[in-house]
Amino acid sequence: MGCAVQPARLQSPRAEFLMMATTPFSELLSNSFSADANLRVSATAALEAASRDSYPQYMGALVQELSSEQTDVTIRTAAGIALKNQFTAKDARTYDQLVAKWTSLDATLQGQIKHILLVTLGSPERRAGHTSAQVIAAIANIDLPRGQWSDLINNLLSFVATAGADTNKKISSLEAIGFVCETINPDVLQSQSNAILTAIAQGAHKNEPNEDVRLAAMNALLNALDFVRENFEKESERNYLMQIVCESTQSTYDKVQVVAFECLVKIVNTYYDKMQLYMQQALIGLTLNGMKHENENIALQAIEFWSSVCEVEWSIMYENDLDYEDPSDEIKRHNFGFGAQATPQLVPILLFLMTKKDEDDDEDEWNVSMAASTCLSQLALNAGDLIVSPVIPFVEAHITSNDWCYRDAAVMAFGSIVDGPRPEMISPLALSALPILIRLVKEDPSVQVRDSAGWALGRILEALSDSISANPANIQQIAESLMVGLNSNESRVSASCAWSLIMLAETNQRSPEDPTYVLSSFFEPLINGLVAVGERPGVDSNLRASVYEALSNFVEHCPADCEESVKNLTTGILGRLQITLGMQTSNDANALQPHEMQSHLCNTLTACVRRLGNGVRPIADSIMQLMLQIGSQTKISSVIEDIFFTAGAVSVAIEADFIRYMDHLTPLILSALSNVEDVSVCRFAIGLIGDAARALGQQLTPYVAAIMTALLSALQNDHLDRDIKPEILSLFGDLAMEVPLAVEPYLSHILQFLSLAYQSCIHIDGNDYDYLAGLRNSILESFTGILHGLKATDKAALMLPQMPQLFAFVQSIYEDPSRGVDVTKTIIGFLGDIASAYPGKECAALFQQHHTWIDSLLRLSKAEKGIQGMREVVRYTKEALRSAQ
């Protein structure tokens, strides 16, 4: 395929498909988004069947519909979306299947499809060209890394350069380039990156006469910003790109301005370290002016620029504090402090924008006022004490204003900055503001102000709990006002107060051993009030979730004199759960569904069990019977998860007595383990097995065979989510430690899976660090449990054949420069476990063979400051090593 692409028609696929279908293809596509549910379901089923059973014909028919200038644009768009869906999927397994279908398609037909898509870029109907650009990018993401469609980029660049009067082709080609850059690995197109960037830059230049072309080019640049990293490293090219973006923020076309500011947001996130000169020369002024623009979309992006600056700088501050505790240590990344420097100019604009609101504003719709408040909050973290002087005068001047907009802005401003300055500076101001905020929550005529005041109280509790709690009257008054707000008829006020009650609970946690606390005198009315709101008909589901979260927090962490109230609540919850068994599921989306209540009640019940501990024994049978009854009736995943969670809490509370429920509970557990596609339920089942193993020890033996069979089967299932595998490996360690004799018959299978697991670590992408760290940790936990279990049964010799590979695995972790200090501690302890398991000379040769890096590891640990327990772990390992060598 050369650069000049001419129109083409598929030879036969569409006609063959139409002969197979009882309904014209265009009609099927139209019906697939019909308001008539029957038509929609029928059409969708027919299209899915065609995709499955007549893939070549289906693909041909879709691309013909997309390219047909005689077809209605809505149908063309539907065809393009359906076509794109044949190349994209959220989960890896489905994507691999789609890739296999496409790559196995006849090469001639593939070529025809690509050819028509390129032609369609020039369609007079812009939406068709736009959709074609999306499909082209989806195919490119498959083909280009495989060395296919090698002339695609040259074709697109040619269209951009030579489209002449064909503006639509130029725009759609720029869109396609941007979409490709957004999804493809930059290494794939490295040789063409300069040509791509040149084409985008030319289209985005201020001299481009067509603003729609310029808009398409700016969008392409936005998508390509990660792609041009090497260009950004070169000062001359970086200057040119920054000039284009900055000039675009001054375009007379608002849409170009919006994208230009979006580019600045992404640039400061990605290339912060290169921004000092540009901030001084242009960006501060451009963005501050942009924040005041009458077009809200422009203002939002300009505000987002400063939010991003503050986020990046806060991240740098955090990382530097975390990694370099010693003042003499070199700081890796410089913090330019752009946010703090701009505070005097930035704050007045933010405060003014926070007053820009209407009474009928949608609380869930992002607007300038909300964006400004968020930015102020992030700025406060960076500016610290510097935020006080420009904000507090505004708060003092307007918190009692007759204009609710200014009153609300004052409340929001104070709530936004409380966690920025030092507590000793902001606490006196917060204490003086409390009476006003408490009154506003209860009495203010403005819903928005009551909402903001409720939120601000939570922010104060979260940031300044020690100062506020120093006077018990403060806590009582706050709690009373929040309960008034919680019972408001306005859901937004109730939601804010519910969140603040969560903060109240989290900042006033006590141990069961504590005799009393500040909330004791009205603890029971407090939890009863929360229950009443949670059961109130018509309550928003998010509010109900917050209410029960607050309730669980209060219950789980209350002192001794609240225990009787917790027992009463537990009995009440059991009664309410019993009632849900008789509730019917409603078709009304706003109606309270039984499974929703079951989840909330089970979570609260779990909190009660944890708080009561061993004291739950008298009602443990009632709890578990109800859990088993619900579990036998429901197929709702979230409810099953909560049942397992509650059961796990009961096992921790009553320990060995939990055995009497295992006969009835095991079938539920095994069913969950076999349903590997339900990741969350499977995970909760694994957690419950671990809890049961620790609670029951050897009593679990009769159930181990069935559990091990299910776990091994799950590991062999191709559909098992990869995140579940490490959890199963960790569970093997728990079982091997608690019931070693019962696990021993499965040891060879476990070791085989562990061997495959630590071999796979070599092939995991380094960017996938969190998963790699979790997998390594699970492998070490599993081997630790196995070692302890075998040592307890005098069968540690069964592990000796694994030791060479195991030492190599630990060495590979040691040699990984990205490992954290916690991992260092883990592998040191693991080496100690090995030495302790073989106190003779069984592993002496291996320890001698690897002594160089082991000695280096132990020396390295001395430099790790502030890691709790590191000294004890090193001492334990050194003593074990002396006996094993």
Image (cartoon, helix red, strand yellow):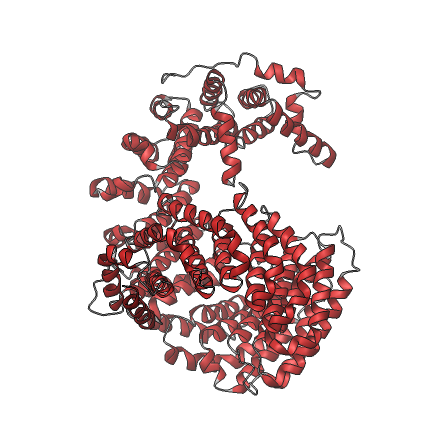
Residue 31, quarter of the rendered image: top right
Residue 222, quarter of the rendered image: top left
**Along the viewing direction, whichever of 744 and 315 lies nearer the viewer:** 744
Residue 812 as seen in the image, left or right of residue 625:
left
**Along the viewing direction, whichever of 199 and 88 lies nearer the viewer:** 88
Q: Position of residue 69 (x, y in %)?
A: 55, 20
Seen in the picture, residue 783 relative to 610 is either above or below; the reply is above
- Residue positioned 61% across, 53% down in the render: 706
Instruction: Kindly give the residue lying farthest to the top in the view shown.
Output: 11
Quarter that holds the C terminus: bottom left
**Along the viewing direction, whichever of 218 and 565 lies nearer the viewer:** 565
- Residue positioned 45% across, 81% down in the render: 466
Seen in the picture, residue 497 relative to 806 is either above or below; the reply is below
Q: Position of residue 33 (x, y in %)?
A: 65, 34
- Residue positioned 48% across, 17% down in the render: 112
Quarter that holds the N terminus: top left
Seen in the picture, residue 728 relative to 41 is either above or below; the reply is below
Note whether residue 163 is visible: yes
Residue 135 as seen in the image, left or right of residue 653:
left
* Count of numbered labels shown in the rendering: 0
Residue 668, quarter of the rendered image: bottom right
Note whether residue 403 is visible: no
Seen in the picture, residue 235 relative to 731 is either above or below; the reply is above
- Residue positioned 44% across, 41% down in the render: 255
Q: Position of residue 823 (x, y in %)?
A: 35, 60
Residue 10 as seen in the image, left or right of residue 844:
right
Q: Position of residue 272 (x, y in %)?
A: 30, 52
